[in-house]
Image (cartoon, rainbow, N blue to C red):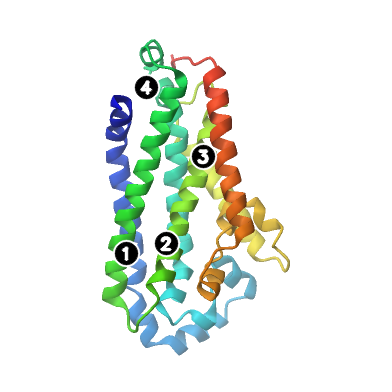
Amino acid sequence: MNMFLHELKSMRKTAAIWTVSLIALSALFLCMYPSVAADAEEFKKLLANYPPAIRAMLGINIENIASLLGFYSMVFSFITLCGAIQGMNLGISILSRESRERTADFLLVKPVSRKSIISAKLLAALTTIIATNIVFYVTTLLIANAVKTEDYSNKLFFMINLTLFFLEIIFMAIGMVVSVFFKKLKSVLPISLGVVFGFYMVGALISTGKSDDVARYISPFKYFDITYIIKNAGYEVSYLVTAAVIVIAAIIASYIIYIRKDIHAVS
């Protein structure tokens, strides 16, 4: 428990910065909505001039763009991009912090198993992500209710925002398994940005294809189609299962490799 609280304390400043950033980004976009709704037809005509491939890449659905949920689904991809970076950062940093901060020897000589160490770190990261998403959702819901021009489904709004949590968990797990393959990792951000932007660009390119159901499995960003969620009030089960498999497999692999690997402090 002491290790969990220590990890949680060490993450609180970064978590606060990410939470504020996500809320600020959401507020910026949502504050644009009243103007879009007021000139909906002109906005639709503007978007219609975009090539279909660009509209698909940006997740633009012209039919629903005038509604709050439709507009939010268009800008939500940028929010999930930032959230994925946060998740990836957490995943990589929790198992590489001791090596980067030269405290690995101090930690590993303590009378505690490596399994307990990784469990405490994982629980702290999960708690941080959950707290971030709760604060983000509550604040964003208040902003959405303040700028709405007509009623919308709170259930669908919650389901859309829940995909942010799913993506953060996926990338946290990926970050964990990536970090255990490095003996010495001096910087987290370059790897996080590289991996996340790589998957994001792959997902954007997949969106431009005509038949992308199978290709969507390549990028976690394509597992949660907001248009599908709004239309069906549910998630696509096959992609949800794939996400769960990735998370479980990555975490199990992280445990196995971390327990067996030689850990050195950075000199």
Q: Which residue is mark 1?
A: 140
Tell me if residue 152 comes above or below residue 190 in the rendering: below
Q: CA distance from mark 1 to mark 4?
A: 36 Å
Please tell me which residue lies in front, 214 or 190.
Answer: 214
Q: Is tag 1's residue or tag 4's residue first in the polypeptide sequence?
A: 4
Residue 11 on image: x %, y %: 32, 36
Q: Contact (CB < 8 A) between labels 2 and 3?
A: no
Most foreground residue, 101 or 164: 164
Check disc 2: other Cα within 10 Å, few if <14, some if 14-19, many if 20+: many
* Residue on which the image places disc 4: 101
Q: Could you tell me the amino acid type at mark 3? A: Ala
Mark 3 or mark 4, which is nearer to you?
A: 3
Q: Is residue 146 visible?
A: yes
The secondary structure type at the circle numbered 2 is helix
Q: What's the residue type where badge 4 is placed?
A: Glu
The answer to whether residue 243 is above or below residue 46 is above
Left or right: 239, with 143 as reference point: right
Q: Which mark is residue 173?
A: 3
State the image coordinates of residue 69 (x, y, percent, origin top left): 43, 74
Q: Residue at x 41, y 14 (%)?
A: 108
Task: Indicate the amino acid at tag 1.
Answer: Thr
Quadrant showing the N terminus: top left
Q: Give the spatial CA distance, label 1 vs label 2.
A: 9 Å
Looking at the picture, tell me which residue is in the foreground, 198 or 179: 179
Above or below — where is 33 with respect to 234?
Answer: below
Quarter of the figure with residue 154: bottom left
Earlier sequence position, callout 1 versus callout 2? 1
Q: Which residue is mark 2?
A: 161
Q: Residues within 10 Å of mark 3 (few under 14, many from 20)?
A: many
Question: Which mark's residue is nearer the viewer, 1 or 4?
Answer: 1
